[in-house]
Image (tube, rainbow, N blue to C red):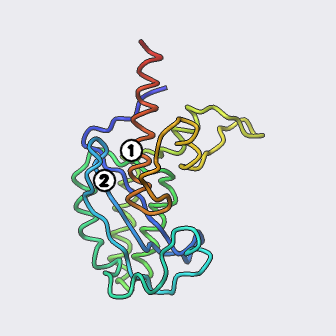
Amino acid sequence: MKKLNTQNAIILDTETTGLDRFAEVIEVSLICATSGKVLFNSLIDPVKPIPSDASAIHGIISQDVIGKPTFSEVKQTIESLLCSCDSLLIYNDSFDLRLLSQSFKYSGASSESVDSFSKFLSDLKQKSQCVMSWYAMFYGELTDTDGFKWQSLSNACVQQGIDNSDLKAHRATADCEMTRRLIDVVNTKIEASEA
């Protein structure tokens, strides 16, 4: 199994209004994969109110995002940061990339702009790595269908003995940092096993 390359890589995480095809991003964070430096973090004001079941998970309520930028207002910043990295590391990349696309679609952008951003995200997928799938392979728990069972980020950190007591799970920047710590620990174990 290969280590994840964190050189000139960005870790991204989002918090959302839900999981379905109507869900939107309400917080996005990007950090440097080597240093943990926060490159970007913002609450996002979605088109629709935040459902209480989503708020129960991440603690973000509709009043928290009033007056915050819309997704359209932060899209360019996110795009330029993601263009500057060699790789993108996301714990469940398919979900976060889909939600970024959906959020721009629901923001009222023109269909041409939406298509352009969707193509950007599709191209970005080529240089993104799903940390959740990578970790599942490392952890090695099999499903009934002989695939590797996905582990939640919190469970993965517990399984690897990572202390995240200084972080609040299910907030974008904290989840980015949890992902960074997990990658560091697993990379070290992979390196040790190859020595």
- Please, what secondary structure does the residue beneath circle 1 have? helix
Work out whether residue 154 or residue 5 is closer to the camera in this orientation and state it: 154
**Residue 61 position within the rendered picture, expressed as x and y whole percent measured from the top left:** 49, 80
- The crowd level at tag 1 (other Cα within 10 Å; few <14, some 14-19, many 20+) is many
Q: Is residue 10 left or right of residue 192?
A: left
> How many angstroms separate mark 2 from mark 1 (CA)?
9 Å
Looking at the rendering, which quadrant does residue 151 occupy? top right
Residue 31 is marked as: 2
**Residue 12 position within the rendered picture, expressed as x and y whole percent measured from the top left:** 38, 56
Looking at the rendering, which quadrant does residue 180 occupy? top left
- The crowd level at tag 2 (other Cα within 10 Å; few <14, some 14-19, many 20+) is many
- Name the N-terminal-most of marks 2 and 1: 2
- The residue furthest front is 165
- At horizontal 29% and vertical 45% (from top left) the residue drawn is 9
**Residue 178 position within the rendered picture, expressed as x and y whole percent measured from the top left:** 44, 48
Q: Are marks 2 and 1 in contact (CB under 8 Å)?
A: yes
